[in-house]
Image (cartoon, rainbow, N blue to C red):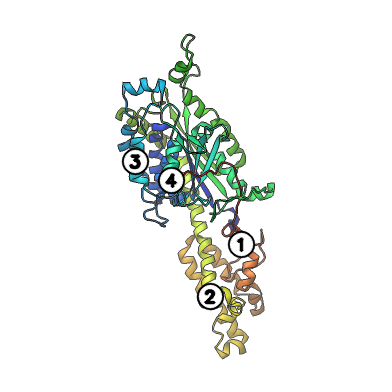
Amino acid sequence: MTEKIDNIKIHRTLTLSGGGVKIAAMFPFLIELEERTGKSISELFPIMAGASAGALAAALLTIPKEPGSKEAKYSAKEAFEIFKSSASGIFPNTFLGSVKQIFTHKHSQKPLKELLEKYISDNRMDSPTSRLIISVNDLTTNGTGLKIFDSFHGYGPHVKLKDVLLATTAAPTYFKPVIGPTYAYADGGLDTNRPENEVLKLLKKGYLHKEQNHIRKEKTLTREEQKEILDHTMVCAINFSNDLEPTSSIPKIGFDGVIGWLVKGKLINRLMTNKEASSTAEAKNDLPGKDEFFEIGLPITKETESLDNASPENIAKLEEIGRKYVAENSEQIQRLCDTLIDNLNKEQAANQTVELIDENFEEDENIENNNEAINKTIAQALDSDDEGFEEDPEYEKDELLNSIKKFLNAFSKQNPTLKTDIDNFLQKVENYTLEEIKECIISFEQASSKWQEPNNLDVFSSCSMEALKEDIITLEGEEHTDNVPGYNEIVA
């Protein structure tokens, strides 16, 4: 085929930076993606990660329509309306709140809890339609700082998504931390406000599949194995690009104590942006290829930098920042959309191929235990009762070719992007002898073993597809467990 199947970006990742109300600027871009592609954000990105308010946005975009569904409940436009209607309640603009921040947390968590209860409900950490990765900070003495909650980690049913979101949005001095017997969780943006690099770390450790329990075994992959994973990965990172004077928020002498740094010095803002550049740089280093790393840098100004200015005027300004970015970067956005759809279509085509192979060899629900059925080739399965099929080689060849054509023509209708390659293959196979055609056809059992061998190019699968590279299948069935520090459970 003109494009190798092992180049499919199956680990398509969207990361959303934290920033309080500033995430309002993200939604016009997300809405634009859905409108241009006709797909939900969850369909486009099998992996989503967020810190702080970015995690809240990611969660809203991955809540299932109903338990067990792979369809997201809210579109980007609906998620934005939820955020806009709730923001002023979560971040009330009162003089009392500003004074209160000097001594304790500025805002009550009650409005945020109400939002989470209403829209996130009792969804578990493993419920989202995409793999959801959320960063949290552990403030306890024994804590290691950054904690990662991963919906693929196999948490128990008591670990609720709303509890993890309450923890990751608990920015110090703005909200109180989420405290348990052995932890005190606060805003995930303190350690990793841009979560793209943390996602890549998980992938490079080989944590690719959903686990059935909460025990992970530490693994060390070789550079070649890591490169293989990264070759299947692309990231779209939505970050904030602060266009601020470097000295604009340094408190003056005489006002440089705790209060000065918290208020004038914007200490929390500084902590949240401290590691941003290095995180993005490391991600770009891992994904240097064309169309592997897309960064959406939303330009935040001094006027709109506040984490909690939820006034209608400020929300409107942030929304306008997002709209302006979309208008000025239409070509880049279209390239991103084309890349996402191209890889999504290829992945679906590859999955359909595997499903059709399986269907061709299924004779009953217990076929996995039926060795005789498994070892039958397609040549034996097609009209084997017809006496002429065995006695006349030309007849046998015609029947076999007709079956192959029937299968592949139906397949190409479902996958028009592969039609040219399929037509070329069918033209080529017309000149094959019967024995050559039979040599190209392998049994289901043989195909299964071939799929476990990396970089295998030497056989046709039972669907007679030329040059399908079965090594992609190894990414679909493996189980991985490890013991990564930081996967503490929140007990509701």
Q: Of label 2 and label 4, which has the lower sequence position? A: 4
Identify the residue position indicated by label 3 in the image: 115
Q: Is residue 252 visible?
A: yes
Left-right relation of 446 to 345 = right
Q: Of label 3 and label 2, which has the lower sequence position? A: 3
Tell us which disc is closer to us: 1 or 3.
3
Q: Which mark is residue 161?
A: 4
* Residue at 53% from the left image edge and 77% from the top image edge: 403
Question: Pointer 3: residues within 10 angstroms few (<14), some, or many (20+)?
Answer: some
Name the amino acid type tagged 1. Answer: Glu
Element type where label 4 sits in the image? helix
Identify the residue position indicated by label 2 in the image: 366
Question: Pointer 4: residues within 10 angstroms few (<14), some, or many (20+)?
Answer: many
Q: Is residue 249 visible?
A: no
Left-right relation of 203 to 265 = right
Question: Pointer 1: residues within 10 angstroms few (<14), some, or many (20+)?
Answer: many
- Give me the C-alpha separation between circle 1 and circle 3: 45 Å
Above or below for 192 versus 291 = above
- Give me the C-alpha separation between circle 1 and circle 2: 24 Å
* Residue at 66% from the left image edge and 50% from the top image edge: 225
Above or below for 200 versus 258 = below
The answer to whether the residue labelled 1 contacts the one labelled 2, judged by CB atoms less than 8 Å apart, is: no
Q: Of label 1 and label 3, which has the lower sequence position? A: 3
- Give me the C-alpha separation between circle 2 and circle 4: 37 Å
Identify the residue position indicated by label 1 in the image: 470
Q: Of label 4 and label 3, which has the lower sequence position? A: 3
- Give me the C-alpha separation between circle 4 and circle 3: 13 Å
* Residue at 56% from the left image edge and 48% from the top image edge: 233
Name the amino acid type tagged 3. Answer: Leu
Element type where label 2 sits in the image? loop
